Image: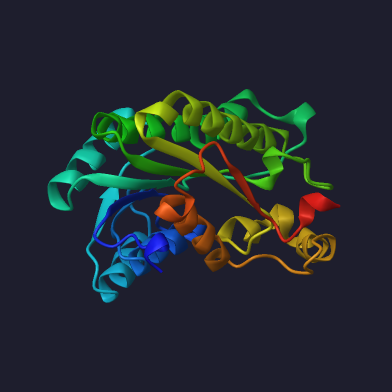
Amino acid sequence: MQLFSLKDQVAFVTGAGSGIGQAIAVGLAEAGADVACFDLPGSPGIRSTVERIEALGRKGLALAGSVTDRNELDAAIAHTEKVLGDLAVAVNCAGIANAQAAEDLELERWKSMMDINLTGVFLSCQAQAAVMLPRGKGAIVNIASMSGSIVNRGLLQAHYNASKAGVIHLSKSLAMEWADKGLRVNCISPGYTATPMNSRPEVADQVKIFEQTTPMGRMASVDEMVGPAIFLASQASSFCTGVDLLVDGGFVCW
């Protein structure tokens, strides 16, 4: 359907080397976009992401850098525009997760979570908006989490939850600042998803509980985040901005 087409548009995806970011980067190419894939230097999966994009007949670009460094983001976006063309879509997926009791949480671990999950999203949006706003058009999609709306039973992750709540409210705030400037900002809040993060030792015993406490009885696959991302990036959602789209198998209904 034309409403969902991203044909010949240029997209930029952070965290594109694995998990949800990788799936969305490939999905945007399936929808017709050329995709710049941004991840940390040495990311083992970034080459695979680009190869999958190119196998679809679209252009892929591998870019290395940190979302905590505005200069590296600016350089990556400038290179994207030089090689692929004007940036039209951005999806910010880079993030980390870990668990620790709040009373024992070291300040540096708190800061690292906020630097990557929240400040990293802000800097990414800021760098993307720097080229989109002058053109008066564009779509940004940030990946938050249902943990930004609820507190997960049995998981000691106040720092993670707080960072994702920040992403949701940041996205809404940017959406309102840029609504009259042609730039839409929305976010997706995944529920329990089968990503490398959910293979962490501290959540291994929780996987069955994740499945049992999700109304649909299972975790999502990373591919189930692709459709929502294409919707929010495309003209299918042309009147949507400031939306937090929960993709959680019904979890927050209970």
Q: Residue at x 60, y 30 (%)?
A: 169
Left or right: 185 with respect to 42? Answer: right
Q: Nearer the viewer, residue 244 or 162?
A: 244
What is the tally of numbered marks visible in this picture? 0
Identify the image quadrant of the N terminus: bottom left
Coordinates of residue 95 in the picture (x, y in percent)? 51, 44
Quarter of the rendering containing residue 249: bottom right
Q: Residue at x 84, y 65 (%)?
A: 212
Indicate whether 124 appears above or below 155: above
Residue 242 visible in the picture: yes
Q: Position of residue 175 (x, y in %)?
A: 48, 31
Residue 203: image location, x then y, percent: 73, 55
Residue 112 visible somewhere in the drawing = no
- The residue shown at (24%, 60%) is 8
**189 left or right, relative to 85:** right
> Which colour assignment does the render follow?
rainbow
Residue 42 x/y as whole percent: 34, 53
Which quadrant holds residue 110? top right
The residue that appears at 69% across and 46% down in the rendered structure is 146
Q: 18 above or below 141?
A: below
Name the one closer to the observer, 62 or 85.
85
Residue that protrudes farthest toward the left in the picture? 82
Q: Is residue 165 above or below residue 245?
A: above
Q: Is residue 38 left or right of residue 236?
A: left
Vertical relation: 76 (above or below) 18: above
> In which quarter of the view is residue 210 placed?
bottom right
